[in-house]
Image (cartoon, coloured by chain):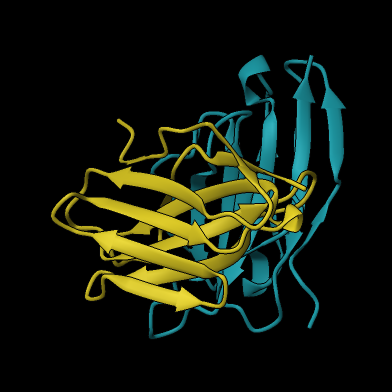
Amino acid sequence: DQQVKQNSPSLSVQEGRISILNCDYTNSMFDYFLWYKKYPAEGPTFLISISSIKDKNEDGRFTVFLNKSAKHLSLHIVPSQPGDSAVYFCAASGGSGKLIFGQGTTLQVKP
Amino acid sequence: EAGVAQSPRYKIIEKRQSVAFWCNPISGHATLYWYQQILGQGPKLLIQFQNNGVVDDSQLPKDRFSAERLKGVDSTLKIQPAKLEDSAVYLCASSLGGLQISYEQYFGPGTRLTVT
C-alpha cells in the first residue's frame, strides 16, 4: 500500500527551463509535506516543506504547491540548473513526525 | 555544526552472517530514525527513538533486526542473520524532537549493505 506516490521515475529538462516534479498521496490525515534532494552516495537533504493549511510555499528558485482536494503536491524549480540534477523525494507526515516517502524522481538538467 | 555520522559506509557480508551499523546524530537532537532504502524505492522507516525510548518500530523485522540507543545519543542497528533481501542502504536521521514535533529530519550518508 503506497501512501505516497511519485509516478514519474525520471525527468529531463533543459537548463534555464522550469522543472515540475509531482507527488500524489492517499492518506487525508497527512498534514505536512516535505521535499528532499539526494545526490549519489549521500543522504537526502531537506529542500522545502509545506503545511496542509497552506497551498503554496516559496524559497528562492523552489516552490511547492499543495492541492488538498486532489491530494497532490508539486515542486517547481525555476530556473533549473545543472547542479539541480539529483533524485527528489516527496515525503508526508500525519503529525507524529514520522515521514512516509515516495519512490523518488530522478531529475536531469541538461546544460 | 557536524552532521549525522554513520559507519561503516559500505559492508559486504554473506547471507546468515550478522552485521551492525552505527549512527551518531546531530548534537542535541532528541529524535533518531533508522531507514532502509532499497534500490529504486524511497526510504522506509524501520525504527524511531525519542531520546532512548522507542516511539515506532512497527516496520522493524524483529525476528532479525534489533536497534538500541544507549544514553539517548548514539545508536546501533543490527541484523542477525542477514538475508539476501536485506541488501539496501541503511540511513540514519535525526531531528530536534522534544515537546514540539519537528518534521525536518537530517540524514547521514548511509551504509550500503550487500548480502551475497
Q: In this picture, is B51 found above or below B39?
A: below
Q: In this picture, is B42 found above or below B73?
A: above
Residue B106, by quadrant, is bottom right
Whether residue B6 sits left or right of residue B28 in the image: it is right
For the N terminus of chain B, the quadrant is bottom right
Query: Most extreme residue toward the left, as rendered?
Result: A69
Residue B87: give x, y in percent of width and height.
Answer: 69, 25
Residue depicted at x 27% and y 50%: A72
Task: Say which chain is cyan.
Answer: B
Residue B23, by quadrant, is bottom right
Whether residue B73 sits left or right of residue A36 in the image: it is right
Residue depicted at x 77% and y 44%: A40
Task: Say which chain is yellow.
Answer: A
Residue A36: give x, y in percent of width and height.
Answer: 56, 58
Say whether residue B36 is visible: yes
Q: In this picture, is B39 found above or below B52?
A: above
Residue depicted at x 38% and y 84%: B100
Residue depicted at x 58% and y 66%: A46
Q: In this picture, is A14 found above or below B97?
A: above
Of residue B107 and residue A57, the one placed in the foreground of this image is: A57
Residue B26: give x, y in percent of width and height.
Answer: 70, 75
